[in-house]
Amino acid sequence: MKKVIFRMPRIKLGDKLFTFKQERQKRKTITIALKAHGNILIKTPHNTTDEEVYKILYRYADWIKKKDQTYEELSLNAPINDKYITYKGAPLYIERIFASTPPLIKVSGEKVIVKYEGSIFLPLSDIFVPWYKEQARLHLSQRTAFWAEEMQVAVLHITIRDQKSRWGSCSARHNINYNWRIMMAPPAIIDYLVIHETAHLLQMNHSASFWQIVKKYDPSFEAHRLWLKQNGDSLLNVLRL
């Protein structure tokens, strides 16, 4: 039996066509949230009719349009935006394919193909963040194993975290934590972070001796460290699209 895909309703506000999803809940108030890309989520009491939903959206049209414009302006330089994602320092342009399948991501050349069901109301970041975390787990595990062998140290466990201010950490128990967002940085920067954290297994501080170890394995570490300092905020503050 062929599966029927239900499309979300649409509403035109000004010159732009928005899609919206109504969630009926056990509540007394109504809330509206713009999820970017022209997607609106409106939460209403169970007895709110379709006609009432349209009236509410028209009533708040100015707010929705202003919010949408803000998203567009912010997304121009965001590492995850409506047109591309940043992966290993380079843009991968997004190609969307609507299909009756769970979200599926595949990198092909300079583009990333995203397959997902047309009725799924998911922000792009909700689709891509789990993918980034999996890429981080695979890539950082490989690079950590490489540099640990070079430094002749043992790493017991690697954890991929979602952190807003730290790139990584290393414990005396030989466990290393990485922030998945580092996968948006160029490969040399990713390796600098791995070398930095792995070097802590030899020197658990930021003394001159520690930096000499880092320099031994990354002669350009000062430039890489500066890049992360200058560009890190744009990667840490991923716009939730």
Image (tube, helix red, strand yellow):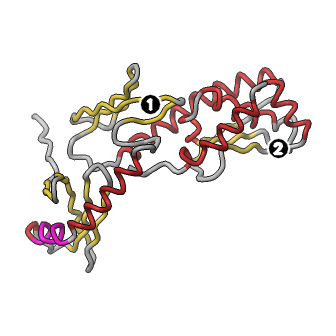
Q: Secondary structure at mark 2?
A: loop
* Residue 120, numbered label: none
Q: Position of residue 178 (x, y in %)?
A: 64, 41
Task: Specify start and end residues of the magenta stretch as a single range.
Answer: 52-59
Q: Amino acid at mark 1?
A: Pro
Instruction: Say if 58 sits above or below 154 in the image.
Output: below
Considering every residue shown, the one lying at the far right of the view is 209
Q: Secondary structure at mark 1?
A: strand
Instruction: Say if 212 sits above or below 65 in the image.
Output: above
Numbered-mark total:
2
The quadrant of the image that shows the N terminus is top left
Q: Position of residue 96 (x, y in %)?
A: 27, 33
Q: Which residue is mark 1?
A: 91
Q: Amino acid at mark 2?
A: Ala
Q: Position of residue 217 (x, y in %)?
A: 79, 24
Which residue occupies 22% across, 34% down? Answer: 99
Which residue occupies 73% across, 40% down? Answer: 175
164 left or right of 75 in image = right
Q: Foreground mark, 1 or 2? A: 1
Q: Earlier in the sequence, mark 1 or mark 2?
A: 1
Q: Residues within 10 Å of mark 1 (few under 14, many from 20)?
A: some
Quarter of the view holding residue 33: bottom left
Q: Position of residue 105 (x, y in %)?
A: 37, 31
Marks 1 and 2 sit apart, C-alpha to C-alpha, by: 37 Å
Q: Is residue 58 magenta?
A: yes
Which residue occupies 65% across, 40% down? Answer: 228
Q: Please tell me whether the stretch drawn in magenta is mainly helix, strand or loop.
A: helix
18 left or right of 230 in image = left
* Residue 172, numbered label: 2
- As rendered, which of 178 and 39 lies closer to the eye? 39
